Image: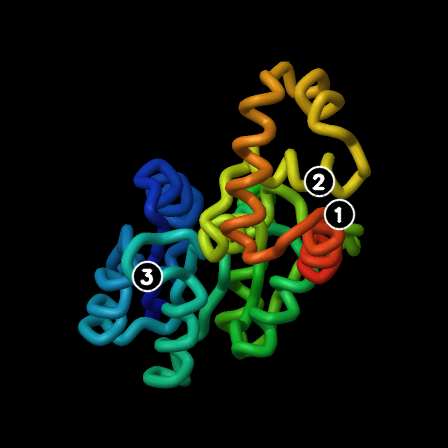
Amino acid sequence: MTKNRIILADDHQFMLEGVQSILKGDASLDIVATAQNGHQLIDAVIREKPDLVVLDLNMPGYDGLQCLEKIKQGFPQVKVLVLSNYSQPDLINKIKKMQADGYLTKNSSANELRNAIGMVLSGGSYFQQTEETPAVQEDSYYFDEFLKKYQLTKREVGILRLVCQEMTTKEIASTLFLSELTVNTHRRNILKKLGVKNVAGLVNFAKQHNIL
């Protein structure tokens, strides 16, 4: 029996070992390589010519989206199942448009992972259904990317949200158990990083980026 060749990519060793443990009993699958960063993954795809890549989004080097793009452009025959912590519909829709073959969250069951892999390898697709969220959540891929892009901390985003709720510096300090001096320092830093001049600018920015 010809086995399906699989590469697993995740920057956490325990995740790689966990997925390997789930799949090792399937005689139709052969895990030919693992990778803990994007450069290792692309090298492994070139070397091993797999049938399927199980891909994490957060990896050093090339991130998951960059890897997905490179694989689909350079090796369109390789199927890609994204396995991620994130469940935001906008992200999943983007990954669909990038021609991924499936998307599964890491809190899924072992059976669901096996079913998703089977469906993708048989020529189908597997995308979990998720509910719309009213704003970008702190456990989302977009939130992580937002922090990186604007060099903000989670504390600064929290203060940004409170400012947009028309809370004063004194109220914010009391809510977060900070000094007013610390809050004012954060406010100045936020304005500088986002390139806006006042509260109205902050509110407009937060609305545009779905932070509220």
- As drawn, is 78 to the left or to the right of 150? left
Q: How many marks?
A: 3
For marks 2 and 1, the one nearer the N-term is: 2
Foreground pick, 83 / 156 = 156
Asked if disc 1 and disc 3 are in contact, CB closer than 8 Å, the reply is no
Q: How is the image coloured?
A: rainbow
The residue drawn where x is 27% and y is 76% is 49
Image height of 27 relative to 126, above or below: above
Q: Find disc 3 in the rendering and name its residue.
A: 7
Circle 1 packing at 10 Å, graded few (<14), some (14-19), many (20+), is some
Q: Earlier in the sequence, mark 1 or mark 3?
A: 3
Query: In the image, which is nearer the foreground, mark 3 or mark 2?
Result: 2
Residue 23 visible from this viewpoint? yes
Which of pointers 1 and 3 indicates the residue nearer the eye? 1
* SS assignment at label 3: strand
> Which amino acid does the dot numbered 1 rest on?
Leu
Comparing 187 with 102, the one in front is: 187
Q: CA distance from mark 3 to mark 2?
A: 41 Å
Q: Are marks 2 and 1 in contact (CB under 8 Å)?
A: yes
Q: Which mark is residue 161?
A: 2
Q: Tell me the element at label 1.
A: loop
Q: Residue at x 55, y 54 (%)?
A: 194
Quadrant, the N terminus: bottom left
Camera-side residue of 99 and 176: 176
Query: Residue flagged by tag 3: what amino acid is it?
Result: Ile
Say whether disc 3 or disc 2 marks the residue closer to the N-terminus: 3
